[in-house]
Each structure stands twice: as structure tokens, then as C-alpha cells.
Amino acid sequence: MEKYKGVIASQGLAIAEPVIYRRVDYLEKTPTTCRADDPSREKERLENAHRVLNERLEKLKETALDEEKDLIDAEIMMLETMVMEAEELIENTSICAELAVKKIYEKYEVLFKESGSELINLRLYDLRDLASRLIAILLGAMEKEKELYRGKIVVADEIYPLDFTALVKHEIKGIVTRRGGITSHVAILARSYGVPYLIVPGLPDIGKAKLIILDAINGLVIIDPDQSTIEQYRELEEKYAKLRQVYAREAHGKASTLDGVEVKVLCNIGSVEEARIADEYGCDGVGLLRTEFLYMDRETPPSDKEIEESIGHIMELVKGEVIVRAPDIGADKPVKFIRIDNEENPQLGVRGIRLLLKHKDILLEPFIKAVLRLSHKYGDRLKVMIPMVSLPEELREFYDELIMVKKTLEEKGEKVSIPVLGIMVETPASAKALDLFKKIAPISFASIGSNDLTQYVLAVDRGNQNLNYLYDELQPPVIRTIKEVIEKATGTGVEISICGEMANKIHAIPILIGLGIRKLSVPISLVGRTKYVIRRLNSSELFRLAENIVEETITKNQVYEYVNKLLEKHRIEYV
Ligand code: PEP
Ligand code: MG
């Protein structure tokens, strides 16, 4: 059993046999000679195939993004020309429809290549694709493909919209791709057809895997799961079918407990694409913008202008506050352009704020310039958060840099403002001494990064699969640490929120609210479920629950038992 994390492009759950999607080039399967005894019959076959493909293209246009609509129109025109010319060829040479299509394609291939234009050559791919699809319909290949894909989870490097329209007819159960985007046309189609879809860049070759679980609620794909995982997911699958509509209805508007305490549900995002759909999924803002996407997969760091442009774009797309995290590079988030040598233990090494302070010129300054300018434009709606802080002097150094860069920009006549500032609480040091930070720099919030905080409190590497049985945010020492964070913040004016995965857990929500947290930041796909839970809880009851858990529980199982009783009492259903 192996697990891989991915980005959810369309929510859902599926358990099925995987099948690798291979695009067949039907031009290669076309005979080089074939005679048509009845040319008018061949023309009729071609017209029918044309109609089928044309309908699929027209249907695609209904959900296409604006820029894609023009491309689809161009394809419709190319298809029409190709079919017209193929009909003429059938009439004149009495060959079968498949071969006529192939010959017309080959004619254009020569012409396009002779043009020497890169743009025209790109259109050649589209033309070949259309010709291949037309031939596939003529050969009746779609029916054979149906047998191959029906009821399975399709795994591919990438899937194109026209592939999807065929696959959905084959009644597939889900899709996993290594490349793609959550606002791509395929993702939009998958959401509108209710097909679970996960993008997993690190997915290895699935080889001979017999079964996979596509958990597009928690963003996981599990290859060859063990029996107990299968059973657990079979149950979830059934429940999810019922609850999906309920959660979707709950996603929008404010979420308050039964006794009127509002709890904001913000979102964790890591791309412009996710910002685009945040509102559609009911996010009350962005509680964690992981800016690392700006730094990954490139040979040089981004400039201040690039950073400003991307974050500015996100500010325009999102309603409500946006907490921008300074790049958290190092350890589990390496970049190509910085080598960190001599680290035997990268999780305790040069990462987060430590790396930013070490590379002020290429990392910190460009980021600070961008957020200073954006803060002037967006005011308090933009907040900046520093990752992996353990000591107040790190915050001070960051702050001094902020003031210095601000002065330099102002001297050049630029309009800039100091952003609302906060830190992530991810280390036991910052948790224990949270009150000290405010004394050294004007921070107004602190967001609990429970992924790292759990790792450091429990001394369990978050990525070490051998220690999965220990790593749990609901372990009593983690809960106690969070209580301490809140106590230390009391009276300092520092607002405490949480953006680690603990907030994703149904069992953690009542405890976090009971401890006093009023802002949870979760993945986009979990907003509906989180608001559903909040609206069924009573805050006064949660206060007692948290107190009892802190004082009485010794093991994580006891914590779960406490919360289970509460969930049952309020008939809260979950997957
Ligand atoms: C965390 O540590 O909880 C967190 C949100 O940061 P990341 O997962 O990006 O390290
Ligand atoms: Mg972290």
C-alpha cells in the first residue's frame, strides 16, 4: 500500500481498478489501401462520424473558458474543411472514408510543414488529433474503448477535454493525472459531471496495481490498499454519496455555532488557479497562501515584480482577507536555485525564516518589496505571515528588513505600506513564548501550523511513514500545546487562527473552537463540510469539552472517544 498526495480538481471518492490512459493514434491504424464499392455509402459514414465529433466539440464549447472557445471554433472549421475534401476524394477515387481522411490529413501535413511557421505547425497537432478521432469513430473504436475503461479509475500524464468527453461516456469512476490544473477545462468538466479528479505530480508508474483508492476529499491516492483501508473507504464511499449534496449546500455564507459564535472558514491555497475557484467553494478568505509555487520548478528566484503581479492577481480573485505566507523554502520544500549543504536533519535545519534571513538579497527583499506595494493598494485585506519562526529575534530581523526596504522604496518615490503582520506557530519555542513576540515587533495575528507543530512537539518526522501511528494532531500533548498558545496570546491583541491540517479533521473542529479559535483555514474542498460541522455545535458545550480533554485524556484514543460522543449527540455525519 502506497499513498500519494495530490491537488483536488474535482471532489469525490472512488475505489476501482486503475487503467492507464493511452491515446491511440488511429491514423496509424488506417489501412494504406482500401476500395469503396459504394462511394455514396462511404460519404454517408463520414458524414455520420463528422456529426458525432462536431457535437462533442459544440458541447465542449458550453463549458470552455473564453480563450478556449476560439480554439474550439477553429477546430470545428478545420474539421469541416477536412471532411469536405475527404468526401471529394471518395467521390473521385472510390476509397474508403478512413483512408480519405488520412490522405487529406497527409496533404495538410506537407503544406503546414512547408510553411515553416511554428504557429501553423502547432495547428498540425490539432488537425492530426481531429483526423485520428474521426477515424476512431469510423472504425467503431469507441465501443472497444468502452470495455477497457468502464468502471475504472483512469490514470494518465495528462488528459485533454475531448478525451474526457469520451471517457465520461465510458462511465469511468475517476481520474488521476500527473499534469494539469484545477481550473483547466478538464477540471471544470470533471466537476460538472461529478467525476472525482486528482492531480498528483509525484505519482510513479502504477505498473501492475490492482486497485486504487481515489480520495478526492482529502487529496490522496492510495495504491493497492490493504483490506482494512478498503473496508473503511467502502463505507466512506457510501456515506459520501449521501453527504455530498448536504456539504455543497452548506458551503456559502457565514458559519456560526448554534449559540451564535461565528467561526470563519478560510482556505489554504497554493496557486492562482485555486484563488479563481475559492469564492465558488465558499471560502471566507484565504488563511494561508502558500507562495512557494512562485519559487518551485525554476532555475532562478522570481523578481519582486513577478511576485507582486501573482499575489496581486490573487488579491483580485479572492474576496475577504488574504494571508500571504513568506516563502517557506527548505526541508520538504526545496528549490533548484539554492543548495543547502551539510544538513543531516533538514527538518531541523535552514528552512522558513532561517533561509529567508540567510538569503535576504534573492529571497527576502524581493518578497518584501512586493508585499509593501501590495499593502498600499489593498490595505488590511492583505496580511503577511512568517513561517517557521522559533525565536523573537528572527521576527525582529524580518521586521527591521521590512522597515529598511520600505524606506528605500519611499526614497524612490514609491507608494508603500507596512502590511498587517503575523507569524506561524509551528515550533514548540514559538508556542511556549508567544507573548514575547509582540514585545519585539507589532504582530497582530499568529496562525498555528499544526503540521509542523505536531512534528516538533511529538518529535515525529511528518513525512516518515513508519511513524504514522504516532503522528496525530489529536495527541494530548499537541492539544495542550495549542491551549498554551491561546493562553499566551490572551491579552496581547494577537489573534490566533489555524491553517495546518488539524483544522481539516472533523474531530479537531470542536476542540479548536472549544479552546477559543475562531478562524480555521482548510483546503477549498473541505469548506462545506467544515461549515456544516460548525453550524451543528454549541460553543458553551465545546468550552467544557476542550477543558475535559486537556485535563483528563492520556491517549489520542480517549480524545477521539470524547469527540465521538459529541458528534453522535448532535447527529453530525461525516466522511
Ligand atoms: C503547517 O506546518 O501546518 C503548515 C501549514 O505549513 P506547511 O504544511 O506548508 O509546512
Ligand atoms: Mg509548516
Image: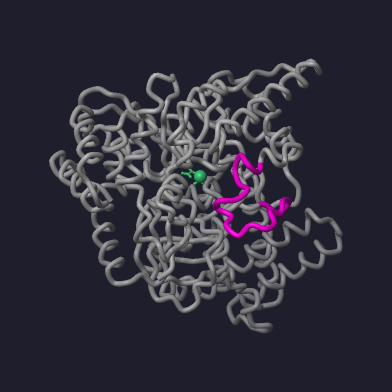
Please tell me how many numbered marks the rendered image carries: 0
Residue 110 percent across, percent down from the top left: 81, 67
Left or right, 557 with respect to 197, comes to left
Q: Principal SS element in the magenta part?
A: loop
Residue 542 against residue 144 in the figure, above or below: above
Residue reaching furthest to the left: 569
Query: 64 or 362: which is nearer to us?
Result: 362
| Quadrant occupied by the N terminus | bottom left
Picture quadrant of residue 255: top left
Residue 280 visible:
no
Tell me which colouring the rendered structure shows.
one colour
Residue 81 vs residue 466: left or right?
A: right
Nearest the viewer among 292 and 453 is 453
Res 215 → quadrant: bottom left
On the image, the x and y values in percent for residue 571 come to 16, 42
Is 425 located above or below residue 457 in the figure? above
Residue 419 in percent (x, y) is at 59, 22
Identify the residue at image location x=37%, y=64%.
213
Answer yes or no: is residue 218 visible.
yes
Residue 400 highlighted magenta (yes or no): no
146 or 207: nearer the viewer:
207
Q: Position of residue 316 (x, y in %)?
A: 58, 28
Relative to 380, is 34 on the left or the right?
Answer: right
Q: Give the magenta-colored segment's residue range.
A: 335-355
- Compared with 318, 202 (above or below) is below
